[in-house]
Image (cartoon, grey):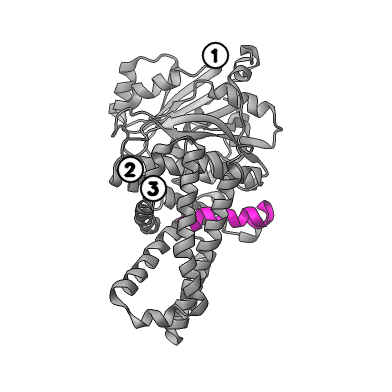
Amino acid sequence: MTTTGQCQARAAEYSASRVLTARQAWCFALLLAAIVIAAVIDWRMTTTVLIGLSAMYFVLSTTDRVVLMLRGLDGRALLRVSDEEALAITEDELPPYTVLLPVYDEPDIVETLVKGIGQINYPRDKLEVLLVMEADDEATIKAFDAAKFDWITPVLVPPSEPRTKPKACNYALSLHVRDSEFTTIYDAEDIPDPLQLRRVVAAFAKHGPDVAAIQCRLGFFNVRHNTLTKWFSLEYDQWFAYVLPSLAASGCVVLLGGTSNHVRTSVLREVGGWDSFNVTEDADLGVLLARSGYRTLLLDSVTLEEANADVVNWIRQRSRWYKGYLQTFLVHFRHPLVTLRQLGFKPTLRLLNVTAGMPFACMLNLAFWALMAVWYFGKSHVLDDIYIGPVYYLCLLLFTVGNLVTILAGLVSTRAMGRPYLSTAALLVPGYWVLQALAAVKAAVQLVYKSSYWEKTVHGLSGSGKM
């Protein structure tokens, strides 16, 4: 490969190799010191102010999320390419395409993975499929060799730190990818829409070079397995079908999903590929593309995955996502004014709300629930001094109307998606908030001492399942 085909090195300024810069550390230290000093002077008023600010954030964040979801219900923000339009593209018109399949310690799922990819309707001579494996992952390598898929190229990544998916994908992109026009990633358990690559090509052709990425919808093939998979599916339906398309339509940052995101290869190399140290490299890439002046759109082409059916495994996966969101926030807000100038005011606020706000809000939920329990069971008079006037009524509004609106939004989405069997899960969704809170706490702790540790998700726990 020529030098022009190489991926530029990701600048340290845009890498999570450092958790905090010196400036950020000082800012957080000063903020903490100010809170401590205020608490020493008047801990009741300090607590009241903090609770009031937190409740105000919850109200604004919940309102914005519901507004985005409702705007997305009409479906206009979601790109659509019909089967006829996708199949009308001749083989000569289809560009070279690279598909990365990063796997680690998953020998049992290799054959399923490549069979799913093998159903993709795209000429083999224009399709480069790279199975990216760690060089010391002997079990997976043996499973691939035994499967004898001669149309897939194995890429063995030399052992080195960090042991992450983005590091492995960067290795493949820099050393093994030919000059393809588009690059995408599928995960180990993925079953993509067979026409997805053709649909993406057609969608890119309708837009200018400022559209650098197209994210396809993600869904689950084991939705009905248990309550957890139903909660997970309900969340994905809202996120990929309504919220992300609304963000794209409003010119805001689209955080890419970990799979089925299709990127112009030249742009991917231009921005330095993925951040090897960020454990949600997809979200980070979405932000970097936006900061570089590119747009991301959503396409109505579904890739089916396996929803986590095990609580412990789900918390492992979700804590990694939240940790990655926090990493993304810290990286892209090292110079907040620069980010604000590049993205604009509204996109910056919404980016803050998703990256830092989402895990932070989940952790705050634990504090609010604890205070409510103390008030209900202990009837503490101290809380009467804390929940004064406006703060009390704001929190009451949040607890009643805010929670009710969130649950109703879930019910609306089940009807819009034609999935009435998710209605019970939508009503029980506060249980899902508890799991999210636990995952957020774990993410915050790991961010301190294991920032780039990749918490592996175990696949194949619920069989094939059905939609």
Q: Amino acid at mark 2?
A: Thr
Q: Amino acid at mark 3?
A: Arg
Q: Secondary structure at mark 2?
A: helix
Q: Which percent across, then down, holds residue 194?
A: 50, 20
Residue under pointer 3: 318
Q: Few, some or many C-alpha atoms within 10 Å of disc 3 (few <14, some 14-19, many ≥20)?
A: many
Task: Work out how far the residue at label 3 is from the one at label 1, CA to CA, in angstroms.
Answer: 36 Å
Q: Which percent across, then down, holds residue 130?
A: 46, 24
Q: Nearer the viewer, mark 1 or mark 2?
A: 2
The reply, left or right, for residue 93 in relation to residue 222 is right
Q: Earlier in the sequence, mark 3 or mark 2?
A: 2
Q: Nearer the viewer, mark 3 or mark 2?
A: 2
The reply, left or right, for residue 178 in relation to residue 455 is right
Residue 25 shows up from this direction: yes
Residue under pointer 1: 123
Q: Earlier in the sequence, mark 3 or mark 1?
A: 1
Residue 227 numbered tag:
2
State which region is magenta: 339-358
Q: Residue at x 49, y 61 (%)?
A: 401
